[in-house]
Amino acid sequence: MASDVLLSVRELRIAVEGVEAVRGLSFDVRPREVLALVGESGAGKSLTARALLGMLPRGATASGSVRLRGDTDLTAQRGRRIALVPQDALSALSPVHPVGDQLAAAVRSVARVSRKEARARAVAALDRVGIPDAVRRARAYPHEYSGGMRQRAVIAMATVNEPDVVVADEPTTALDAELQEQVLRVLGEQREAVGAALVLITHDLAVVREHADRVLVMYAGRQVEQGPAARVLDRPRAPYTAGLLASVPGEPGASSEPAAPDEPAASGDPAASGEPARAGGRRRRLPTIPGVPPVPAALPPGCAFAPRCPLAEDRCHREEPRPWWVDDDHEVSCHRWDDVPYPAAELFPEPRA
Ligand SMILES: Nc1ncnc2c1ncn2[C@@H]1O[C@H](COP(=O)(O)OP(=O)(O)OP(=O)(O)O)[C@@H](O)[C@H]1O
């Protein structure tokens, strides 16, 4: 293991009820870096996140390895060296205990400290994430917090024991747009304050560009492309990444033609939406990747993206591509990576209005 690798994932495969949904992922997370996992719904991001924490759902089995500082006992590290910020803060907090008690219990689960000291650390953690009047708020129950406050409390919970890695699974999905940026800012600040790396699962490539050092793009349980976020977003080498980018307003990969002026603006999962969007003050129809991702039980032969890929040729429908380093820190799994044009939007023309 290279000395600067904190979390090392090798050939991770996860099957649910015997059906493989994550198929041979390998990646590293280095100290203090932010790695974004992106891909459409069903790509296997959440299962991967759970595997990093040693908490796979019932019926799921994993093979391959996940090592945190060389250690494979992830359950023992959970809450201590690796912690989760889940999608839904309400389900992560117990409704029957005050928030401060829950944080103090998290402190005492890993550190031999007095109740008073645990309480003090809990209040300090709430204060750090910007919960006003933290001493009083620590005595309140989760339902007495607003949605944004609850998500901050969950970030406080994940970072209170100063873990090496925080895994955040779409931490802003349940929040309105205004709160999303706030919560991501708090998450970034806390990560820096405790010196943790962050594995950030998101649908939003604008979030990747703003917050991630590296990105891993997933499709149908496989890694399609990974590398430094700016390099991957500026010059995607996998047609799938190009398609995701083409559907994000303002990205270099996205088309810039104006469309009918009466179209509403887009929201949500960009690749799947195909909705009109606004860029540079103009409304336009965004290109989308045609079709939908396959379900794990019915994968096509060869490259799973081939049926949707504008560059697919015979070989793509027969042979699954192996990951290939296109330069020293940028890996792609695509037979046609060298034929992806620049700008990549050319691959995905705009739909007709
Ligand atoms: N508990 C489970 N039982 C059965 N199938 C599951 C379970 N969890 C995940 N799967 C299946 O595994 C595949 C990957 O799911 P996963 O939740 O990891 O995807 P994802 O990329 O996180 O999607 P989303 O963005 O919608 O959360 C999907 O086909 C999903 O239906």
Image (cartoon, rainbow, N blue to C red):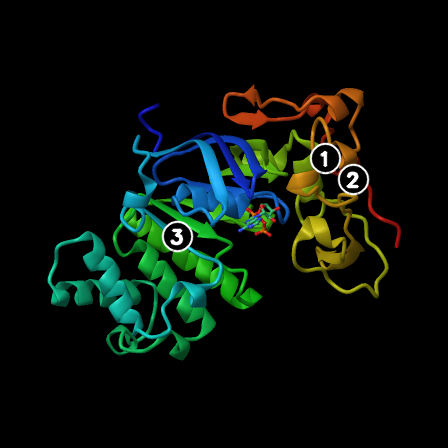
Tags 2 and 1 touching, CB below 8 Å: yes
Above or below, comparing residue 312 to residue 81 in the picture = above
The residue drawn where x is 32% and y is 74% is: 132
Q: Looking at the picture, which amino acid does disc 1 mark?
A: Ala
What kind of element bears circle 3? strand
Which numbered dot is residue 344?
1
Alpha-carbon span between mark 3 and mark 2: 36 Å
Question: Which quarter of the figure is the C terminus placed in?
Answer: bottom right
Q: Is residue 259 visible?
A: yes
- Determine whether, in the image, residue 107 is placed left or right of residue 114: right
The residue drawn where x is 29% and y is 47% is: 163
Tags 1 and 3 touching, CB below 8 Å: no
Alpha-carbon span between mark 1 and mark 3: 34 Å
Give whichever of 230, 145 is nearer the camera. 145
- Determine whether, in the image, residue 352 is placed left or right of residue 269: right
Q: Position of residue 288 (x, y in %)?
A: 76, 46
Q: Position of residue 51 (x, y in %)?
A: 44, 42
Question: Badge 2: how crowded within 10 Å, few (<14), some, or many (20+)?
Answer: many
Which numbered dot is residue 348?
2
